[in-house]
Image (cartoon, rainbow, N blue to C red):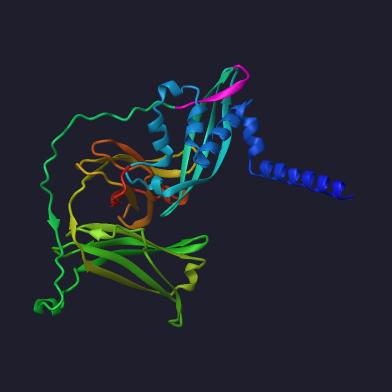
Amino acid sequence: MKNVLAVFIVLATGLFVVLAWFQSGGGERRQMRSASTPEQAARFLLSEIQDRNFERAYEQLANRSDVDKKTFIREFNGSDGSLLTYASLETFDVWGLRTDAQEASVRARLHYTTAVGPLDDVRDIKLERRGETWKVLWPVNPTPKLPPQVIPVNYLRWDVINPRDGDDWGVQSVDSPQVRIISMNAISRPDSVVLVGEVVNEDSVPAYVNVGATLLDASGAELAQESSFDKISHTLLPKQVSPYRIDFPNLRLERVKKVRMDVKALLESASADPVIEISQQKIETDPLGKQVLSGQLVNESGQVVNIPHVIAAYYDSNGKVIWVSDGYVAQALLPQVPVPFAVDLPAEVAKNVHSYRVVVNHFNTTAQT
């Protein structure tokens, strides 16, 4: 009886191990090693990337002799302190676009979690049949190798020097930079109230700016209080203008009778460098059918911009701000290397857009790999 019980325990344990392996995707991945469909091949490749098995992912490429391994790994693991170095691939979806006897293409949507929130990446992947299996043909996009350049450093810079403890002049009060909200527009959304507008630094020194708002009902009671958070360019040089957006989830505009705005500004060390050129801007439909404002960023300075942040303001025919959208760029901006960007735009807003303006905020880190 004891032997029968021992055998039963061993068999049950083995069964649970097998079930756990299948539930974790092991069975699917084993099947996808000899991918009989293009979708299977793409899913297997992305599963390896999701598990950060970049070497195994690279081995699945049909054209790996033409693809630099380090470049392939950096594309998903990040480099130069980019946003992807602080991200992980959480989920992905794959669906077919076209398949014939020897070639196919699929579309993949990659959903990352990052230090600044979710990030989606849509890719069209080509594949080819090798015997009875399908393999991924990875695009070969060599990074341009620029010759050594001398970039003159002649930009303006402002430093804030803090007094030492005990210095008499340190007790003197310092006025905050003169910052003013120049426009505000309350917008009703299906699930929220949104305030959009612009703020300007009217002073001769840089300012760190944040815009907040409080919504009040007819009795004067507070409904909600929010700030622009990262939907603003916080560092404003003298005379510089930034869009802002403040979201109030789960509120209806008809409940709001008054808006109390609040702008705070602090002295901040800043410089006019790096200079980031914004070009090829256009409103278009992305592969998922969403309206986006796309374009290209070029870092014209000599330093790496680790995490670019794009903020766009949209205006109607009367020059009124009708929406503000923002988005982080996954790649770092190397000097003189163009990088594409795209930020979402609600379809019902896009039809009323007469013009738009884009600004680029940025965050620098010390981690560059």
Q: Is 33 located above or below residue 249 in the figure? A: above
Q: Quadrant of residue 149?
A: top left
Q: Is residue 229 left or right of residue 64?
A: left
Q: Is 215 located above or below residue 195 in the figure? A: below
Query: Residue 135 colored magenta?
Result: yes
Q: Is residue 203 left or right of residue 366?
A: left
- At which x and y percent is residue 220? 43, 82
Q: Nearer the viewer, residue 70 or 180?
A: 70
Q: Nearer the viewer, residue 3 or 152?
A: 3
Residue at (30% x, 66% y) in the render: 210
- At which x and y percent is residue 5? 85, 49
Q: Quadrant of residue 144?
A: top left
Q: Which residues are magenta?
A: 131-138
- At which x and y percent is residue 41? 58, 29
Q: Nearer the viewer, residue 345 or 170?
A: 170
- At which x and y percent is residue 299? 24, 41
Q: Quadrant of residue 132?
A: top right
